[in-house]
Every structure is written in C-alpha cells, then in structure tokens.
Amino acid sequence: MGLLLHCALLLSLSTFAAGLDFQPGSHTSGQSVFVKRSNTGEEKAAKIVKRSLPAWLIPSPNHKIKRRSTDQGDSCQALQEYGTKLADNTHRYTFNDLSGSVSLAWVGDGTGVILALTTFQVPFFMIRLGQSKLYRSENYGKSFQDVTNLINNTFIRSEFGIAIGPENSGKVILTGDVSGGHGSRIFVSDDFGKSFTHRDLPFIPLMQITYNPDNSKVLLVLSNNNEMWLSEDFGSNWKKVHDMVCLVKWGRKNTIFFTASLNGSCSDRGMLELRRTTDYGKTIKTVATKIYSFGLGGRFLFASVMTGKGTLRMIHVSVDQGETWNMAQLPPVGHEQFYSILAANDEMVFMHVDEPGDTGFGTIYVSDDRGTVYSKSLERHLYTTTGGDTDFTNVTSLRGVFITSVLAEGDSVQSVVSFDQGGEWVPLRKPANSKCDATAKDPEKCSLHIHAAYSTAMRLNVPMLPLSEPNAVGLILAHGSVGDAISVMRPDVYVSDDGGYTWIKALDGPHHYAILDSGGLLVAVEHSPNQPVNQIKFSTDEGQCWGVYNFTDDPIYFTGLASEPGARSMNVSVWGYRDSLLSQYWISITIDFRDLLTRDCDDNDYVQWLAHSDDISDPNDGCMLGYKEKFLRLRKDSVCWNGRDYQVNTQPTPCPCTLDDFLCDFGYYRQENSSVCVEQPDLKGKVLEFCLHGKEEQLQTSGYRKIPGDKCEGGEMPERKEIDLSKRCVSDLVGPELLIDSHSSKSVPVVITVIIIIMLLSVAAGVVFVKKYVCGGRFLVHRYSVLQQHVEDNAAEGIDEPLETNHTQNGKIEFHDDSDEDLLE
C-alpha cells in the first residue's frame, strides 16, 4: 500500500436502486460464501481522506465506561504440549471430483450429520449442463461417504441449495432438474439424509421450497409462472392454491400471507392485494389493497401502501393478522426511497427510513409496543441501496447491545454502539493495546471502527462480519481499525468479552474465525487469498492468548471455516483445495479439539459477572430495561470443557423505576442530555387524540410511556391514561371499503370527505410528528429479538422479500472457487 498506510473510508455513492421497501440487510446467520480471490489492491475500493470525529458523535460527559472483565490469572501458560493431542484428532478427506462449488448443511442439532453437495455447471446455448455429487458425514465432517446414487446422479440446482427442515425433524429437500432441462423434481428425506425419495413436480419452482415452521410436512413454493403451490404430505402431492402470486410468506399458526396481482403483472407495484389464508388455501381473504410490499416481524404485519396520488408510500401495521390496520407515524417515502425492518419481536419494531435522494443514509426509528408510534433513534444511519448494505449488527451475546455505522459529515464512515437498545449511541472505545492511526487529529477522540457488510461490499480485505453467540455471553469477534473513521487498510481482529464496552486487539491482520464450546474455545485461520495455508490458531481465554497448530504439511488454498451452528461443537473443518497443473480437488480437514480440554468444567471454573456495569458506586449500576443480570462465566485461566448441555445461567434482579425506564409520550420530547420529557410548545393545552385499532382515543399523560418489556418495580411511576372516545377512525390507504359505515349511509359523502382531509393532514403530520413530537435527545427503546432479522430482495421477480422470522436453514454454507467475491455471515 506504500504511502497509503493510514486512510479513512469514504462512502461510494454509486448507482442506487429505486423504491425498494423492506430492503435486504446483512447475510443471514449461519450462511456463508467463500471464494477464490484475485490479487487486487484494496485501495481501489474507496476514496482516501482524513477525517476528524464529529462533535455529535463524541460521548456525553456523563457516559462512563470501565473495564468489566473479571480479574483472573495468567491464562497464556495454561496450554502446553497440545501439538500431539491435536495431531491425533485431525482428520482429512479429499473429494474426488472437480466441482466448482460445494454447499454444506448440518442436519439436526448435535447429530453430527453433514451433507455436502458439490456442483459443476456450465451454460450451453439456452440450457445448463451440470453435474452434482452428494456426500454425507455422521461424525461432524471427519469422514464422508459418497451417496450420489441416492439422488440418481441428478443435477441439483445450487441456487436452491439444501433445504433443511425446522427444529430436529431430520427432513431434507434437494431440488433437481429433469433430464433435458424440462421440468423439475425433488429428492426428499425424513431420516437425516440416510435415504432419499424422488418426486416429480407439476411445476418449475422459482424459489427454494419452504417448510411450515409448525408442521414440517407442509411445504410451500412459487412456480416460475407465479403460481402458489402447497403440499400437505411432504411433497408427495401438490395443489395449486392461487395464480399470479408475487410474494408469499409463512405467518404464525399455519397462516400464509401473499400478494397477488389483479392485472397479471407483479411489476405493477402499489396495485397489489395482500391476502391471507389460515386453512392452506381453502378460504382466502383480502386484508389490504394498494400494496407495494409487505413484511413480517414478531407479532407485527407490515404493509408498504401507496397513497392516493401514487407517488408516496406509507407503512401500515397490523397486530391481528391484517384484520385491522394502523398507520405508522413514520415519514412517507418516494419512489427512490425505501423502508427496512432492522429488527422486530413481539414488543417493538426497529425501522430504517431512507433519506430522499441518493444519500446512502437514513434515520433509524423505534416503535412502541403497538408498532404505531415511533421515536427517532439515530440519524445519518449508513444504508446503501446498492444491494442493501447496512452495518447494523445485533450483538446476540448481551441484551440491549447493537453496533452500526453512520455516514458522518464529510462522508466518512464511522462505527457507533448502543448499550441501551438505541437510547444512546457512542463511539466504540479504543482498545488499550492499540494505537490510533494517522487519521486521528485528536488521539483522545480516536475510536475503534468495525468492518461489516459495507466493507465487504466495497471489496475491502474483510473475510468475515462481526460474530457473537447467545450462549457465549458478552463475547464479540470483529474486524476493525482504530482512528477517526473506518480505514481501507488491512484490518485486524478485535475481541470484546463484555458486550462491546471494552476491546482488545486479538490478531494481526484479517482472519476467518469461529466460536466453539459456548465461547470456551475460539479458532481462527489467517485470510490469505493468494498463498496456501497450513496453520490454525486457537484460544481458550477469549482471545487474549493464541496457540498455533500446523494441521497439514502440504498447505492448501483456504476457502473457509465450517463449524456446527450454535457454537456448542468442539469440531471445526478447514475447507480448501489443492492446486495442480491438471486439477483442483476439494479437501476438508476436520480438527476435534475435545482432547485439548482434558476435563469437564466444575463450579470452581466459573466466576460471577454483572452485565452492563459501568459504575460500581451507583446502586443502579447494571440496570437495563428495569433489571440487572448476573452471569456465571468461565474463568479465562480455566482450560476445561463447557459441554453441549451448557446453559447460560443468569440471576435477574429488578431495579426501581426511573425516568430512564420510560419513553417520552406523544407530544413530548427529551432535551439533549436530559431524562426529563417536556411538552412540545405547539401542543401545550391541546387535547391529544390518536387513532388506534380503528378507534379514536384521547391521551391524558404526564409525558411518559413505559418501555415495553421493561421490568422495573416501584420508584417513579408517571401517570398515563387512554380514554376511548367511541369514535371510528381508519386510514383509507389499505382498503377504501373499510370507510363505509352501514349505520350512517346518509352521511357517507361527508364522512369520506372528512377522512380524505384527515388522511392528507396525517401524511403531513407524520413528518412533523417524528421530527418534533416524538422523543428527541436521549431515547430509551424496546427490547430486540435475539436474532437479527433481515430481508432479501428477490431479483428474479423484481419484488421485495419481506422480513423473515424463520430464515435460518440450520447453518447452510456454500464454498466457491470460481468467483472473485467474498460474502460471509
């Protein structure tokens, strides 16, 4: 890189897609793509500039961060003479084919069963010629058996991958092509891939077949001519449910939601109908019209609806599966903008609203427990429309923590973290063992910046996204750089053991990494695109000290690490290939670390740890959403095995309520660095009314609304009351027929006129509301779901794929050696 040793990353504002609601986010957990990389310079990915930290990102004076790691002995001396133990537990398998890609899928939890599907295909005129081979392992990848005969040597379509059934059902579906390229067939297994049965389909699938989350025998799919097909007997028999379906998604309790086109074209966005069936298509009900796209998250059903003039879209929310709708108090968006559900559960929604123009950023809003009233959480949130690149990361290892990036003034990309679920955003603290780079004008303001989806989209040297696991409490692994902004320089690997409050530089340069044994073991392989590797690094003390093991005398071109999802396994597979003049063969080297940890952990190996503790002198230290949590965590100098049955033990303690346990209510806002909600001057003395579930209600409030999910007890409890005014109110955007009241037919024209006026005022008021009336300054928000949810754009149909609540396919991983891209989980 020469003189470009200390550089900051600028957002590249290139061609943006227009008008995509429920935009795709990062890649789903447990799915990865590893590729062979070309030798290109990283500096081509972005412009170079020096930036200082803007004032609005500087932590407030009352924000304190102290070290939370338990004081423990020297863990670097704990491991000795491990070479022989690991050598005796290293297993190699060479795949005897020349396929260009291999897909992996774990079947069941703790079964040790892995399916590996290798695929080789080339286009030939208007058809594809290809070959597939299927391999199966019952010992976590230590050895494989060629079971291609079970699928009759059929070419399996790699774009649909290996569809694994929910829970531990043991069901597997492979989608293949019929000889000659006309038609499709599936191979199904209900015994964890021991045997397969083929079934010809009366259609050609457009998408991967999806399972009913509550009944794995029931399957759903769209065909290439937009027909919706359903099977109730695991694919033996199929029935066509509906024609001209643009998007379909499983809801709760056997419910299916889908959008249908009335004019035979799914490209006519804004004119679709949202329909619902609860009996597998026997009866179908239209629940909304004028639909642009829809999404699901937690108990919420979202619809992006075109306004009357057809130039703006607004979000509507339903909590009763579409029976009634409420207009979300969010700004409307135009054709070049989008909405994105970043996270949602039964208690709240976290929504990104794109800014007008090709800015590459927007604003994050958080909802109340009804999904209707929203508070502004973070401005200038980085989210490009070029493939849906957002760095938003839900840290699953500690409640309330998430990390994302902002586009600062001057267009530098900077990382921020929130420990209170969006209430306060601050820069990440500089690791004690790292120095600021040359971009830092003020070393005191230097901070850690995390590389995530945007960095991979810019083709920086970042092989993996941030990694955390619910059963590895407080642990985060991530690539990062230290300075004023994200750097295009070669990143290093940083580790936090307290949920992101403090960090250490753990490894020099980029690496692939994995969490094993619930955090008791970390493994990493150096990212070396152009040189073969033969070493794996491991740590038993959360990244403070690392051992190095040579897993082969004949180095391989490394493509990725593979370990069982859930971070409970002790096995990890190093995947790659050996290159010769005539061929390239896939090779898998699986290392079992169980013998490295010679004993099971006992009570003496664990210490008590208070999460979210930053000031031990404060009696409310550690309080988050109304309660404290103490965990038993493994000592860093304990070299022992947590085991597959390890459960996270927590000791919750309720906290007395303070104003920080409340959001500002409608018509109130918080001033900067204050917990007090003050009344908006424009609304002083005015009656506050709002529409909820079709009823007009009057709000009597002292300015506070308790955060949904907050468990505080006693203390400050501001008064709040909602009075039903027994008046009907509803938006006409989702269904004009809802406006007609059979008991007052004479006044229908007047009612419609009044409601149209109200609708127009609501559109304008929505923008004003979120900017002025909803809480400003420091906002506490609601609890997030454990899994970060994302949406995926369906490029084949040009439509938006909604938020998926059951999208993880048991850790499917894909490896490729024929591409120059690198997309990881």
Image (tube, helix red, strand yellow):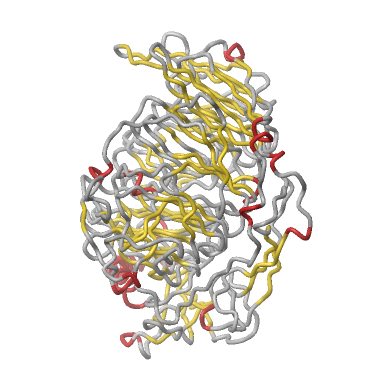
Establish if 293 lies above or below 229. Answer: below
Q: Is residue 363 above or below residue 778?
A: above
Q: Quadrant of the N terminus?
A: top left
Residue in front for this viewpoint, 638 or 192:
638
Instruction: Evaluate whether residue 61 shows in this view.
Output: yes
Say which residue appears at 49% left-offset and 46% top-offset: 804
Residue 160 picture location, percent across and down? 47, 28
Q: How many marks?
A: 0
Residue 149, percent across and down?
A: 60, 11
Instruction: State which quadrant residue 613 falls in.
Output: bottom right
**Residue nearer the viewer, 409 or 736:** 409
Residue 411 or residue 597, whichever sits in front: 597
Instruction: Determine the residue located farthest toward the top in the rendered image.
Output: 180
Q: Identify whether 548 is placed above or below 479.
A: above
Measuring from the top left, give residue 669's x and y in whole percent: 39, 81
Locate residue 487: give its quadrant: bottom left
Q: Is residue 222 visible?
A: no
Q: Is residue 510 left or right of residue 710?
A: left
Give the quadrant of residue 215: top right
**What residue appears at the point 56 percent right and 83 percent down from the top-left corner?**
658
Residue 624 location (% of width, % of height): 57, 72
**Would you say 199 lies left or right of 49 here?**
right
Q: In the drawing, does residue 378 fall left or right of residue 109?
A: left
